[in-house]
Image (spheres, rainbow, N blue to C red):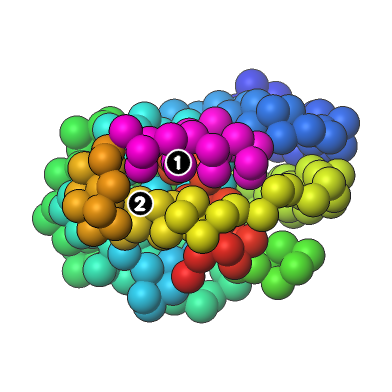
Amino acid sequence: MSYMTTSERQLSLATEISTVNTKAEFAQILVRVARAYGFRHVTLMLAPAPESVLLKALLIETSLPSTYYNQFDRARVMRFPMLSTGMGDSALPRSWSLSDNSSADIFPHELSKLLHDFGIPTGVAVPAYTRDGERILFWLAGDRPVLGQTELNELTMVTLHLLDAYNRTKQSKVTEHTPLSAREREVVRWTAQGKTSIEIGQILSLSDHTVNAYMTSAIKKLDCVNRTQVVAKAIRMKLIN
């Protein structure tokens, strides 16, 4: 899918990305890039580690609905290799499609059904490293044909510009966040393990109302908008394990 030549599209997107300076602008340009290549959704996430359990704890930015990653985590799909892209520690981008017979072994039934249900049977994952050494993935998914090599090369170049923008927006947020209290860290840590407020309250001998109050405070202190974001940010900042 291309509304202009690949070189024109790459230049146009690179120019737009170069103007990104805020987190909101970065989220918008991610979606803009995904749509330019005919994909429905885009996700920027920390690359899963062997001990990773929940997808939502790895998310940095995503256009996927919460119902997707909630179902993903309930099915414990993270136990399969690298979102079933089979990438491991590869530095190369990887296109995939549920219609590709060669992908049968790396797509568990639970994930195949989930991708079909959400209308995203095709995708591409592009790995990268941030300026501070974090391994991340740009993950685009939709119902378009598999990317050809020319488009894959072009998208890889565009994600390098996105990586620069991501590093730039991180660098611009140099203000120190108020450290989380011990209780706030505990609440965020148990949330990262998939516990509900009621379950966390039972573990910490607190009411669910008090647990929610600690979570709200942690969200404000880390300048986040929801639980998913505060968990991901607390992990990146090494405030929780």
Asked whether, in this view, residue 98 is left or right of residue 11, the answer is left
Regarding mark 1 in the picture, which secondary structure is present there? helix
Amino acid beneath label 2: Thr
Please provide percent x and percent y for residue 123.
41, 46
Q: Are marks 2 and 1 in contact (CB under 8 Å)?
A: yes
What residue does disc 2 label?
191
Q: Is residue 3 magenta?
A: no
Q: Residues within 10 Å of mark 2 (few under 14, many from 20)?
A: many
Which span of residues is magenta-colored?
A: 209-226
Please provide percent x and percent y for residue 45.
52, 53
Asked whether, in this view, residue 20 is left or right of residue 58, the answer is right
Instruction: Kindly identify the residue that appears in the image at 21 percent across and 42 percent down.
Output: 198
Regarding mark 2 in the picture, which secondary structure is present there? helix
Instruction: Kindly identify the residue that appears in the image at 51 percent across and 78 percent down.
Output: 89
In the picture, the disc for residue 215 is 1
In this view of the protein, which residue sits in the foreground, 216 or 13?
Answer: 216
Q: Is residue 219 magenta?
A: yes
In this view of the protein, which residue sits in the foreground, 42 or 210?
Answer: 210
- Kindly indicate the quadrant of the structure image that contains residue 116: top left
Amino acid beneath label 1: Met
Please provide percent x and percent y for residue 97.
32, 50
Tell me if residue 171 can be seen.
yes
Instruction: Kindly identify the residue that appears in the image at 64 percent across and 21 percent down.
Output: 3
- Kindly indicate the quadrant of the structure image that contains residue 196: top left
